[in-house]
Every structure is written in structure tokens, then in C-alpha cells.
Image (cartoon, rainbow, N blue to C red):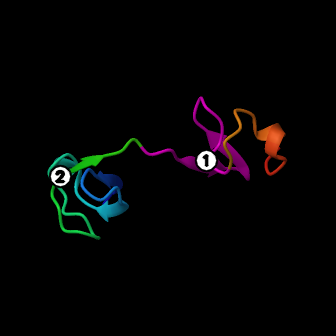
Amino acid sequence: MPLYEYLCRDCGMKFELLRGMAQADDPAPCTACGSTRTGRLISLFAAISDGKVVAGPTGCAACSSHSCAACGLHG
């Protein structure tokens, strides 16, 4: 089951939920205040293949740089 990230529009809390893909965009009760005025966020991810980080077009999830060479964590 995928892990989705949500933001509460009432209290500003970010939280994660394991939900089926069919329920991803359904209202999710905030874990802090219980409000259902929440929205799903676009989440960044990184994958490791053969010991190397495979990142999206904006760099890896380990840092805010657009180049893994900048943070020195991955080669």
C-alpha cells in the first residue's frame, strides 16, 4: 500500500497515511486536529539501484541541491 503525504488546511500539520491508490485523493482526517480540510501533497522520493541513488529531475531527496555532487553524499 502506498504512503501518501497530506497537509491540513486548518492547523498546517503535515502527516502521512498508508492508503490504497483509489483512496489517495479522498479527504483524510488530520492526525493533529481531526479536520478533513486536507489535501494530498506531491512527495519527493529517491530510489537506490546498484548502490547508486536514482533521483528525480530536481536532485536527490537527501538534500536541497540540484546536484548530488554538491552535497557529497552520493557519487
Task: Say which mark, if any, is on residue 21.
Answer: none
Q: Amino acid at mark 1?
A: Ala
User: Which one is in front, 72 or 49?
Assistant: 72
As for residue 13 lying within the magenta part, the answer is no
Instruction: Name above or below for residue 29 compared with residue 10.
Output: below
Give the residue at x 57% y 35%: 56
Would you place residue 58 above or below residue 30 in this image?
above
Helix, strand or loop at label 2? It is: loop
> Dividing the image into 4 quarters, which one contains the C terminus?
top right
Counting other residues with Cα less than 10 Å from the Cα at mark 1, is it few (<14), some (14-19), or many (20 or more)? some
Q: Amino acid at mark 2?
A: Arg
Residue under numbered circle 2: 37
Q: How far apart are labels 2 and 1 at the CA level? A: 27 Å
- List the residue tagged with mark 1: 61
- Give the residues drawn in magenta, as a range: 43-62
Please identify the residue farthest to the top as the structure is shown: 57
Residue at 26% across, 50% down = 9
Q: Position of residue 36 (x, y in %)?
A: 15, 57
Residue 39 on image: x %, y %: 25, 47
